[in-house]
Amino acid sequence: MKNLRGFGSDNHSGAHPQILDALTTVNNGHAPSYGTDDISIEAHGLFKQKFGAQAQVQFVFNGTAANVMCLRLACDSYHSVLCADVSHMNVDECGAPEILGHTKLIALKSVNGKITLEEAQKALIRKGDQHFAQVKMLSITQPTELGTVYTYDEMKQLFSWAKTEGLLIHIDGARFANAAVLLNKTFKELTTDLGVDLLSFGGTKNGLLFGEAVVILNPDLKKKAPYVRKQLGQLPSKSRFIAAQFIAYLKADLWKEIASHSMKMAQHLRILVEGLPQVSVTQPTDSNAVFATIPQAWIKNLREQYFFYVWDEHTFECRWMTTWDTQLDDVKSFAKALQRTHQEVHL
């Protein structure tokens, strides 16, 4: 199989060497299971340092499970959740939020991937109507599926409104570290201090081999969390192997290094491609993704050299993602491949 070094996703890359070292270290000897070991306990303490003393963390295996668990913790089966139309929860969870989360999703029209206050306000209807799934939670993706980032003021405005309306707040943060670096804010400033109740905190897209974290910030939701996780089949027996990765990721600010590098590479990529003939960049490049339309005739040839996703099969908008191991030479080579493809097609 060809080992294409491409721009498909930040979970296409391998694990960061420091993460692998942590796994090797924790592999020595025996330890208690199900999160009662010293490594898991240390990781829990580290999350409290980052998010506040009230934070509880529950490790799970993947992002779908993290999002579903947050829904189960926050909502009853007659509730609904406001989310962006392009959100991962709405588009790429294969119905898991509805089937396993027992929750109806109300997809809001987004602008550059973001929910606007106006759209959220319009969707909050029929309170107390037994015929209508009652809105219980607002869920935003930060950064969004389109590589954009809610500003701090946008978050404050949305969350303030949600709290006024008695809604719980969830952040799908598969790449949350990128937003923290871009906005120059701590994790606590972007969550606890803004009244966030639940966070799906990403690991796999940020250099971990596997594992995500459900960060519970609302004390009223903590008690049932272990039972919900178990019911969802997400209780890791050897919890220390997820915990050790998050310790390596968080303790010495490896998260900042990874986020900064991946976003810097995306900026370089954007600069190199946006002036090329027949390449039109379509979204702001806030995080580590560049979205652009290219001619359909280019796609087959390019994807034989560098794998990437066609985001919209009607407009041929493509997504090019950078990651912790993307190098400047990778970016330059891809831009040159775009140029060559244009020349070959027009010979």
Image (spheres, rainbow, N blue to C red):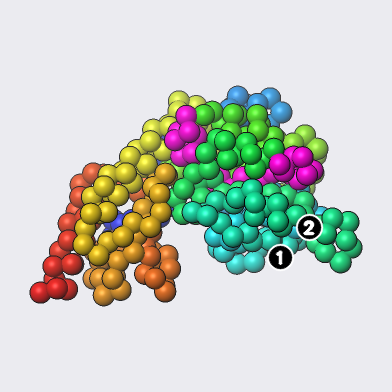
| In this picture, residue 2 sits left or right of residue 45 | left
> In the image, residue 119 lies at what x, y percent?
64, 55
Q: Residue at x 39, y 47 (%)?
A: 285
| In this picture, residue 59 sits left or right of residue 278 | right
**Considering the numbered disc 1 on the image, is that residue within a helix, a strand or a loop?**
helix
Residue 170 seen from this side: yes
Tell which residue pokes out farthest to the left in this image: 347
Instruction: Report the quarter where the N terminus lies.
Output: bottom left
Q: Residue at x 44, y 50 (%)?
A: 147
In the image, the segment drawn in magenta is 161-184
Q: Is residue 313 above or below residue 88?
A: below
| In this picture, residue 344 sits left or right of residue 5 | left
Q: Residue at x 86, y 66 (%)?
A: 131
Question: Label 1: which residue?
Answer: 99
> In the image, residue 325 lies at what x, y percent?
32, 44
Q: Quadrant of residue 186?
A: top right
Residue 330 seen from this side: no
Q: Residue at x 77, y 40 (%)?
A: 164
Between residues 154 and 270, which one lies in front from this camera angle? 154
Tell me, yes or no, whether the highlighted magenta stretch contains residue 167: yes
> In the image, residue 242 lies at what x, y percent?
55, 41
> In the image, residue 336 lies at what x, y percent?
17, 57
Between residues 112 and 33, which one lies in front from this camera angle? 112
Which amino acid type is shown beneath numbered disc 1? Answer: Ile
Q: Is residue 89 above or below residue 178?
A: below
Disc ID at residue 342: none
Pair 2/1: label in front: 2
Q: Quadrant of residue 128?
A: bottom right
Q: Quadrant of residue 193?
A: top right
Which amino acid type is shown beneath numbered disc 2? Answer: Ile
Question: Label 2: which residue?
Answer: 125
**Considering the numbered disc 2 on the image, is that residue within a helix, a strand or a loop?**
loop
